[in-house]
Image: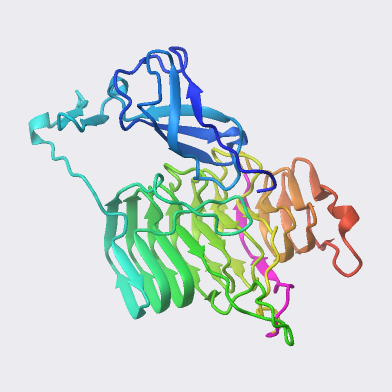
Amino acid sequence: GAFTYTIPSGMRINASVFPHSPYANLDGAVVQAWRSGHWSSWMFEVDAAQSDAGGGKLVFARGGFQGGRGGVAGSEVVIENVFEELDAPGEWFYNVSTRLLYYVANDTAADSIDNLRFEATNLAVLFNYSGTQNQVLRGVTLRDTQYTYMDAHGLPSGGDWSLHRSGAISMDNVDNVSVVQNVLTRLDGNAISVNRYARNVVISRNEIVWNGDNAVSMWGDTAGIEFPGDDDDDDGTSMGFDAVVFSQNLVHEVGIFEKQSSMWFQAKSCSNVVEKNIFFNGPRAGINFNDGFGGNNSIAKNLLFNTCRESSEHGPFNSWDRQVYVTAVRNGTPSTTKAYDRISQNFIIANYNSDEAIDNDDGSGYYDTHHNFFVYGANGLKSDYGGHDNWHRHNLYAYVAQSCFNIIGGAQITQIKGHRDAFHNNTC
């Protein structure tokens, strides 16, 4: 993350921030806050023993690991799981000590509270495929998993993301698994989580809606590839991903809890196909590549709009490439040079807080972006901080606010002959 990871250890509150404070009991209280700049959201458990509710001091016991880039201060903040904040229809509070459930009913509801049914969930994973082959999940509705934003997170690679490595559908070391024609809704963590080795996975014609975190997350591992004649254990992969197909899905209303969320996220993952999907209504990028691992991905014929609705310095598609990986994806021999990723024939509307439709950030390279229709955003081609080999050709850019071709952050100085960005045959 470019600097030492730091997070707040607590906060001061008063009636102007939380009108219902001071709180009589902070046991189980959770503070949710934006990181400054709206790059991610943090969640903290409050340390009731160390906090001074009457004096307006909250001390955090754990949390702040929900983003890969720390910060010394937060931004907008809310508090939950305190009795005094129970003040709106549909809200509830469970007192662990007395085992009483408090619920604020809607006065306009047709049914009385006697006819209401309360259900609690205790599962974060509904289908777990580990070391599995030849499976099909079709025609089911999955819903109501428990939230995972306070569960263990990790940094999958050098980008800004932090991630919880599971989902309502979790895959780990799988081959020939299909998830087809399902509805995945009200899942409070990741909907689908694909990890480590994966081959011939197809995720197609599903609706993924109203979920707490990412719709789909891909997180591979690196292990044991070497240059010829080199006895060192170089960074690379003999596992990774090969042609995971995500096609014809309808994905919307994601990132309800964790704001650093996407419709499609990948880290240490390559040779994937993301095509013919409709993505809209998300807090951050619709598609996020956390690194430049391997390449050979295809992003084609998708419709993206209403992304970056709650965050900044991003685009409907975002990538980082801050780490070097050794793979054989490009030409079959170990190399630090990735294969080109292809972004083609997409219709992308970079509205809300999007900087550009394709945000190739922080060293991103080897992207062939062609025959797309991009609307809005500050820039057309963007390349920065060591970025190179980004090609934009035969694209149509409409209503670009600043520059059609924008190389910033020293990238124009560091690019060398044969590895420069290219911008040609576009209409802007």
Q: At x 60% / y 59%, what residue is drawn?
A: 157
* Left or right side of 297 for 133: left
Residue 377, image x and y in percent?
Answer: 69, 44
Residue 213, image x and y in percent?
Answer: 43, 49
Q: At x 50% / y 44%, what residue is drawn?
A: 65
**What colour-coding does the image apply?**
rainbow
Residue 90 visible at all? no
Q: How many marks?
A: 0
- Tell me the chief SS of the magenta region: loop
- Viewer-closest of 248 and 334: 334
Magenta span: 332-350
Residue 127, image x and y in percent?
Answer: 30, 65
Q: At x 42% / y 35%, what residue is drawn?
A: 61
* Left or right side of 403 for 303: left
- Residue 326 versus residue 105 in the image, above or below: below
Q: Is residue 165 highlighted in magenta?
A: no
